[in-house]
Amino acid sequence: MPVTVRPAQSSDLPAIGELYGSVCDALAGKPYNPGWARDGFPTIDCAREYLNDGALLIATEDGEPAGSVGLTKNPSAEDGFKNAPAIDGGIWYIHVLAVHPAHQRRGISSLLLSAAEDHARAQNARAMRLYVWEGNSPAIRAYEKSSYACIEHGVDIGLAEFGLPRFSLYEKSL
């Protein structure tokens, strides 16, 4: 059965929370883990925030969650670093893109990004942005494959104490 992407509902939150946990478990010990940890980040509370304050999309296959993306109009980090881009209501931000380990390398992240972009366009956005930890090479490849371009390297968003000193800010015009 094909993968479908749709807006998540409150009833999807437990499944998305478990999806996050499965992704965190798979990332544990990997050199490209962006600090994700089960019961740390991301959590069901993050998913609830995206659902309530922006958009939360879920990809399913055979009724099972295969991935999710959370996005809002609010940046996660742009208010606290030197030379931060101005906050702009015409830009939406991707906060969490997660694909279940059993569904990876099948184009689901691309489907989720495309659906997120469609959602943002429908809200009159002119661009999408996201921060990615500079050591997370699989995510960087996925974003670049979907035509996101790095607009700033070496950004300190305040996560150095967690071993994540530098991020890159990526953007895609819509």
Image (cartoon, rainbow, N blue to C red):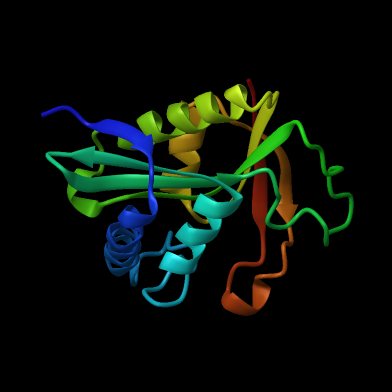
Left or right? Give the position of 62 relative to 78: left
- Where residue 77 appears, as percent x and y from the top left, is 72, 57
Does residue 43 appear in this view? no
Task: Please name whichever residue, 91 or 49, is drawn nearer the observer in this view of the structure.
Answer: 49
Quadrant of residue 159 within the rendered picture: bottom right
Q: Quadrant of residue 37?
A: bottom left
Residue in view at x 31 percent, y 46 percent = 67
Residue 123 location (% of width, % of height): 64, 28
> In the shown orientation, is residue 132 left or right of residue 47?
right
User: Looking at the figure, which quarter contains the C terminus?
Assistant: top right
Q: Residue at x 50, y 63 (%)?
A: 46
Image coordinates of residue 134 in percent, x first then y, are 58, 53
Left or right of 111, for residue 169: right
Which image quarter is the N terminus in?
top left
Q: Which residue sits at x=45%, y=37%?
A: 141
158 sits left or right of 63 in the view: right
Q: Nearer the viewer, residue 14 or 108?
A: 14
Residue at 81% across / 38% down in the picture?
Answer: 88
The residue closer to the viewer here, 72 or 151, is 72
Residue 41 drawn at (x, y percent): 47, 69
Asked if residue 111 shows in the view, the reply is yes
